[in-house]
Amino acid sequence: MAEIVRMPKLGFDMQEGLLVRWVKQEGDSVQKGDILAEIETDKATVEVEAHGSGKLYRHLVEADTSVPIGDPIAIVADEGEDVNVDELLGSSGQKEASSSAEAKKEAPEKKEESQTSESVESSSQTGERIKASPLAKKMAEDHQLELADLSGSGPGGRIVKKDIEAALAAEKSKPVEKEVQPEAIQRPTEEKVEALPQAIWQADYQAPKDQSVPMNKLRQAIGRRMVESKQQIPHFYVTSSVNVESLMLLYKQVNGSLPKEQKISVNDYVIKATALTLRSFPAINASIKGDSIVKHGAVHIGVAVAVEGGLLTIVVRDADVKPIRVISDEVKKMAARVRDGKIKPEDVEGSTFSISNLGMFDVENFAAIINPPEAAILAVSSAQQVPVVEDDELKIGWRMKLTLSADHRVTDGVEAAKFMQTLSKHLENPLRLLL
Amino acid sequence: MEKREYLDIYHQMVVIRILEEKAAELYQEGKIGGFLHLYIGQEAVSTGLISARKPQDRVITAYRDHGVAINAGLSANEVMAELLGKATGSTGGKGGSMHLADVKKNFWGGHAIVGSHLPIAAGLALGDQYQKNDGITICMFGDGATNIGYFHEALNLSKVWNLPVLWVCENNQYGMGTSVERASAVSDIRQKAEGYNIKNDYVDGMDVMKVREKSLEMIEEIRAGSGPQFLEIITYRFRGHSMGDPERYREQDEVGKWRENDPIGIYRKYLLEEKIATESELDEQEKSAEEVVLESVRFAESSPEPADEELFANIYADN
Amino acid sequence: MAKITMRQAISQALWEEMERDPSVFILGEEVGVWGGTYAVTKGFYDHFGEERVRDTPIAEAAIVGAAIGASLTGTRPVAELMTINFAFSAMDHIVNEAAKFHYMFNGQMVLPLVIRTVGGGGRQLGATHSQTPDAIFAHFPGLKVVSPGTPADAKGLLKAAIRSNDPIMFIEHATLYQTRGEVPEGDYIVPIGKSTVQRAGEHVTIVTYSKMLELSLKAAEKLSKEGIEAEIVDLRTLRPLDMEPVIESFKKTNRAVVVEEGWKSYGVGAEIVSRIYEEAFDFVDAPIKRVAQLEVPLPYNRRLEQKALPQVEDIISAVKEVYNG
């Protein structure tokens, strides 16, 4: 039975997705769970999976097209099935008349094409089920090798362990392209003492040439969104200096009792404290939708994570009710997936409020741009030892500056200030965050 | 014999009768599963036989084992709980009606494969002989079991090795629905023992005192080293083979004739005539027996089911 | 260490256990005056006497049934069934009684019982006397099934079996009695329910036991000359089955051949292969093969009989097929 593949909705505020690339071409055989295409949303590039098996019968949109969610993008049919595209799309009642006519116009041509490619396929044996031993499949998955790229030496062309080993050995011997591992912003980079340039001035010194790098999709998306945000949202900023004396003490004590992989970061405390605060400030845990303000029931905290060529917000769902160790664990796992490029839609979609933390870079204070359609974002700076006046005496104290950027259409200064006050209280009594 | 012992025998027989009637009811209510073979009408057989044994004597029987279990000293509670498949049953709900047992009381079980326990009985006797124990083994089986090979292998072996075993054939005239005449080459079952040169006799299974007397005599001879002996006990099954059987294979008046010879009634008459007990004393025994059985039903119904862990318990003795 | 035959090893185990524990006794056809049809109990009758070395009638149900009964009373009978083909005459007592009592009577009854018997083909005894029905006995929970492939294991496992409190089928192979091997003297125990690696190798795992261990070892030596190193896992106990060494070896080699003398259908190989697929599917690099007896009753004619039984060459070609597969 032919099935329509539609642009998936990957978040509550997603309106459309950009189909970046078709992974499966027309005529390719498709197994349930195979990646059909890559979609870029405002926030991330995600993959569209096949929900059924058969053959990719028809692409309904070309690569690099923006498609509203729910619109058909492809048809998957059984092997050898003759699909009446019109009827299928018509019966679904989703496709507009003009597109349907377009599809009709294309249909005969495409059909011929697919027939030709089919006969070629069977003789070249591509597009068939790839034969591989269970072990070879497992190894390929572990090493992210495409079985389709390998040829099998076993009976009937079965890919076996030694084929995988050969492929891995070949890969090793290739000149290694330097892979840039995107780093999460929260993760402090190790400081290295860099060698100074040659001390001798060379008169014929030639500066490296300028390079023109095309903006990747992510960069473009960030650009689009940030321009839109900064131009359209009336930002205002409230900064507080929070006493984190107890927090730093607790942070050390707690981590002293935990193995490395379970340590709880300052940011985890900030997430928990912010989420708890948002519970009492529904107007700040909000979005603009047309002429209404949507006050979100759930508190989903977005946390900005740097990736190669940009940044993404990973989302800790229901952070107000989750224990801090769960939050910490989720952030670690999602950040790892972001860095490994194995991001899932639910990792990045659906935040109701965002946090940007540059605390590990020795930053005194900064302000962040709101992540639309959210109403506010919190910028977290470094916890620092500073001179403070307590009981008319000058002392050394721990302080951390937090700056809230808020949308004046949604909230006002007093509410923002009260929000910061409550947030400070939570952070100044950090033991409660553990309970 | 003391008066207390006479009364105890009466009490046991009545407990068996009421327990079996109660079991039939519970079976019909769906509370007892599987097969249910009742002992009604045969009470005098095992009661008389087992009253003659000493504690060191082993008893092993076939699947019609509720009465034997009671006579061997199992409580009505653990018998009834086993029928209901409860954790408090004699085998924790794992054996069921056909596999009651309590080895501490030297009751080595009900056995459900016809005739299979006869070679095992020979083995029990061999164990005692080998260890020079004073005990003998009493092995009960129906007339139907005497037509299967195990019977002949076991009798032969017991004679060859001179094992201390009393073979007891409860001839209740029917193997399931086939009468003795139609299934056995000889209708006097004890003739088969003759063929193995095993000393044999028979007794009226409706009269508990006669059964007891004959059993005492044979058991003590075996204990003294006579080798195996064979006792045929003529009896009658009041109920069908098991619950749910059509009783078509017996004429109604045939059933009725034997009911007049009810073993409990016969014994009651004997106790009164011999002035061993009074009417009121026997009524009291009956009342007490009824209470024992009613209590066993309460106990069984309120007992817990076996735990899930029991499923894998006791498959092996060693780990 | 002394190099003795498997017959001597079994005999030694029996003798030592009877010396050690007076509750151990032997019963079976021709075990006494005759000295055992395979001469395992030669000299026992004179030494231990007729009470402890008991000749029985030819009546398998009586032999096993009596052994069950005696074991219930606390003695440790070792019943001998002249061949495993005769065990069918005692099948009821083996599977309906011995395998069930401990469980069915909720732990009240304990059966420290060994049933020694002899199986296997290859001696031109015809269809009824040449079977290897080990898998049938291994089907029943409650029974333990042991079948040694070396003299040392035969001694160690038999001693363990006699000391065990469970009913055990101890299956010897008729053509292994002359096999020689080093056997530790005195109290040597091999635990029941433990498979073991009899030969190390890296390319293909051979899973086998009993007589087929001998053939598999020969096959492995020849394969080694061609650069294929087979690792041989000897099951030794069919129930309870110890898959750990099998899976461990398979995770290393990713390829396996199961060799058994019995028929392939519903057999030991079927069980082992399924377990590998269930427990180590992601380590499978080639289809697993079985080498087994052809699906015929064994004929008397020597040439045909040998054709029907697994041979060293069959194992070699199966291993090569799996290695190249």
Image (tube, coloured by chain):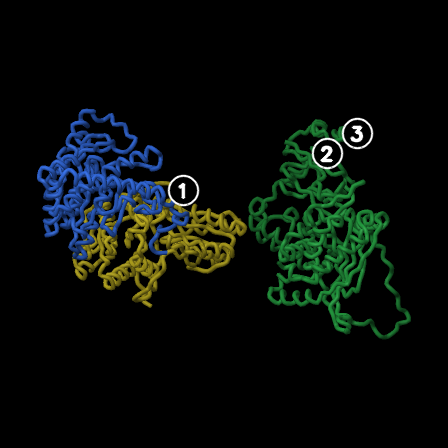
Chain colours: A green, B blue, C yellow
Q: How far across and how far down the image is residue C75, in percent? A: 24, 56
CB atoms of marks 3 and 1 within 8 Å: no
Q: Are marks 2 and 1 on the same chain?
A: no
- Residue C307 seen in this snapshot: no
Foreground: C315 or C30?
C30
Tag 2: amino acid: Glu
Q: Amino acid at mark 3?
A: Ser
Q: Which residue is mark 3?
A: A98
Residue at left offset 85%, top offset 47% = A232
Q: Secondary structure at mark 1?
A: loop
Chain identity of mark 3: A
Mark 2 and mark 3 lie on one chain; the one further toward the N terminus is: 3
Disc 2, SS: helix
- Place of residue A182 in the rendered image (x, y in percent of width and height, measured from the top left): 73, 58
Residue at the disc numbered 2 = A113
Indicate the position of residue A426 as horizontal and vertical percent values: 69, 59
For this rendering, which residue is in front, B215 or B13? Answer: B13
